[in-house]
């Protein structure tokens, strides 16, 4: 299947946030989830976002996905993103193929085209031969691959991933790192990937963004220039992850090239 053409503005931006602020509640009960978030993500970039629970990572993805609105500030996306959750959220009574077909149906794809397109997408995520299996017959990693195929069925060049591998064992996660990386390259996708795992962030990301809490804000970002392929346990990944963990704990507003 050919890679999709990216729908982007002239400067190559795929997602953008300016002065993003999100407040839940009001008065004394108000919680500032995000405050002053400025972010630009280039088309084809794989950006990983790391931070403690409650720092606004998922809120940021929900706003980019259009599931929530900011209290103030602006958000722009080149095309409507697809959102992939930690839980595959597949319908248990449908087969893998039917779960993907449902996403195509909701997009308005004619019935005559859905089955073939769903099989193509399952082939993209290396699930040929598993089309007729229901979720309980698939491993956790396979269910997440069906979820990824369902995202691709939305015909978007932007995929938002909210800790999609957090519930998987280490070996399955390592395998899916390779699978996700391959699909992203083949389909020319722009990805924002939220994780708690710093090594995972370095392993996958072209750029890592660290978010501090109370309120949620970007405290540091850096380009990961390690060569591919990368391994979670490699010295380079481990060293960069350790440095980023130290910076996140410090909670200071570092910027790349502006360290003191």
Image (spheres, rainbow, N blue to C red):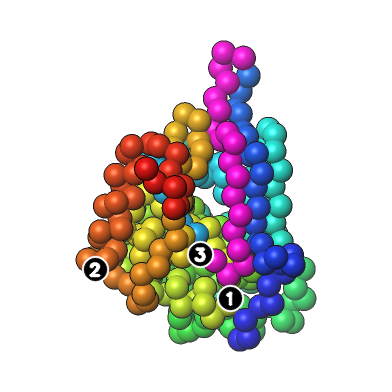
Circle 3 Cα neighbour tier, 10 Å, few/some/many (<14 / 14–19 / ≥20): many
Q: Is most of the magenta stretch helix, strand or loop?
A: strand
Circle 2 Cα neighbour tier, 10 Å, few/some/many (<14 / 14–19 / ≥20): few
Q: Quadrant of the C terminus?
A: top left
The answer to whether 145 appears left or right of 107 in the picture is: left
> Residues under labels 1 and 2: Cα distance?
26 Å
> Residues under labels 3 and 2: Cα distance?
20 Å
| Earlier sequence position, callout 3 versus callout 1 | 3
Q: What secondary structure is found at the residue carrying circle 3?
A: strand
Q: Residue 105, labelled with which disc?
A: none
> Residues under labels 3 and 1: Cα distance?
10 Å
| Earlier sequence position, callout 3 versus callout 2 | 3
Q: What secondary structure is found at the residue carrying circle 1?
A: loop
Residue position marked by numbered label 3 in the rendering: 46
Q: Quadrant of the N terminus?
A: bottom right
Where 163 falls versus 55 (above or below)? below
Residue position marked by numbered label 1 in the rendering: 188
Mark 1 or 2: in front is: 2
Question: Looking at the image, which residue is at 48% across and 84% down?
Answer: 128
Nearest the eye: 214 or 61: 214
Question: Is residue 29 part of the magenta span, yes or no?
Answer: yes
Residue, far top: 28
Residue position marked by numbered label 2 in the rendering: 234
The answer to whether 86 appears left or right of 7 in the picture is: left
Instruction: Please provide the residue range marked out in magenta.
Output: 27-45
């Amino acid at each position: 299947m050919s890679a999709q053409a990216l729908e982007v503005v002239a400067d190559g931006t795929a997602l953008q946030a300016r002065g993003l602020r999100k407040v839940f509640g009001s008065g004394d009960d108000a919680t500032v989830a995000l405050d002053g978030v400025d972010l630009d993500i280039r088309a084809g970039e794989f950006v990983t976002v790391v931070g403690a629970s409650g720092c606004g990572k998922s809120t940021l993805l929900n706003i980019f996905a259009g599931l929530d609105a900011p209290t103030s500030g602006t958000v722009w996306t080149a095309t409507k993103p697809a959102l992939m959750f930690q839980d595959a959220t597949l319908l248990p009574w449908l087969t893998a193929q039917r779960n993907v077909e449902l996403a195509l149906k909701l997009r308005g794809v004619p019935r005559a085209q859905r089955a073939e397109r769903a099989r193509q997408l399952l082939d993209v995520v290396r699930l040929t031969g598993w089309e007729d299996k229901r979720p309980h017959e698939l491993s956790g990693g396979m269910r997440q691959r069906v979820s990824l195929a369902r995202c691709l069925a939305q015909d978007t060049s932007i995929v938002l991933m909210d800790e999609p591998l957090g519930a998987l064992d280490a070996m399955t996660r390592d395998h899916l790192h390779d699978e996700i990386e391959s699909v992203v390259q083949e389909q020319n996708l722009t990805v924002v990937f939220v994780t708690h795992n710093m090594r995972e962030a370095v392993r996958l990301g072209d750029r890592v963004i660290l978010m501090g809490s109370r309120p949620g804000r970007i405290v540091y970002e850096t380009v990961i220039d390690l060569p591919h392929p990368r391994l979670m346990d490699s010295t380079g990944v481990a060293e960069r992850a350790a440095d980023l963990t130290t910076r996140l704990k410090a909670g200071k507003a570092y910027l790349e090239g502006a360290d003191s």
